[in-house]
Image (tube, rainbow, N blue to C red):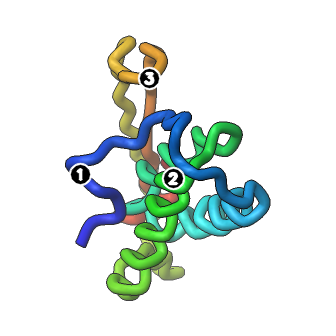
Amino acid sequence: GTPIETQKPLVKDEEDADVDVYLYRSMIGSLIYLMASRPDIMFVVCACSRFQVTLKLSHLHAVKRIFRYLKGQPKLGLCYPRDSSFDLEAYSDSDYARANLDSKSTTSGCQFLGKRLISW
């Protein structure tokens, strides 16, 4: 499976049911902590974290899907052994005003120490 439903984008939904804000924010916080070793969930966690003020039941379902994905893929993750080389490489990319909700630009990047991803 995938950590996000590919055919149904996350959007503001005024008509959906409200959910417990504390629960949602706690779940997002746990996932943000986990992103340090699981970059495969970074995009969807960031997308879900945008709805911490206007969250609805559909957003909670999206977050629960991430947890189900993690349970089904426990061996995916980053490992940082001591004997990695010390060569630093960095890459970046940007997109100008293509976000559907707010037409803001996005920028991202990643840094490798040897062959290991250290930040993104």
SS label for mark 1 = loop
Q: Quadrant of residue 27?
A: bottom right
Mark 1 lies on residue: 6
Q: Using the image as rendered, state which of residue 17 and residue 34 is in the foreground.
A: 17
Q: Residues within 10 Å of mark 2 (few under 14, many from 20)?
A: many
Question: What residue do we see at 45% from left, 27% from top?
Answer: 107
Please state the horizontal and vertical placement of residue 11, each as a whole percent of the image. 44, 36
Which residue in the structure is indicated by mark 2?
Answer: 59
Image coordinates for residue 14, horizontal then vertical, percent: 55, 34
Asked whether disc 3 touches disc 2, contact meaning CB atoms under 8 Å apart, the reply is no
Of mark 1 and mark 2, the one earlier in the sequence is: 1
Q: Does the image show residue 28?
A: yes
Which residue was labeled with disc 3? 101
- Out of 54 and 87, give the one closest to the viewer: 54
Query: Residue drawn 28% across and 47% down?
Result: 8
Structural distance between the alpha carbons of marks 1 and 2: 14 Å
Q: Of the residues shown, which amino acid type is indicated by label 3?
A: Leu
In three-dimensional space, the C-alpha distance between marks 3 and 1, rounded to whole angstroms, equals 17 Å
Question: Spatial distance from mark 3 to mark 2, Cα to Cα?
Answer: 15 Å
- Give yes or no for contact between labels 1 and 2 (Cβ–Cβ under 8 Å): no
Left or right of 49: which side holds 81?
left
Q: Give the structural element (helix, strand or loop) at label 3.
A: loop
Dividing the picture into quadrants, the one containing residue 29 is bottom right
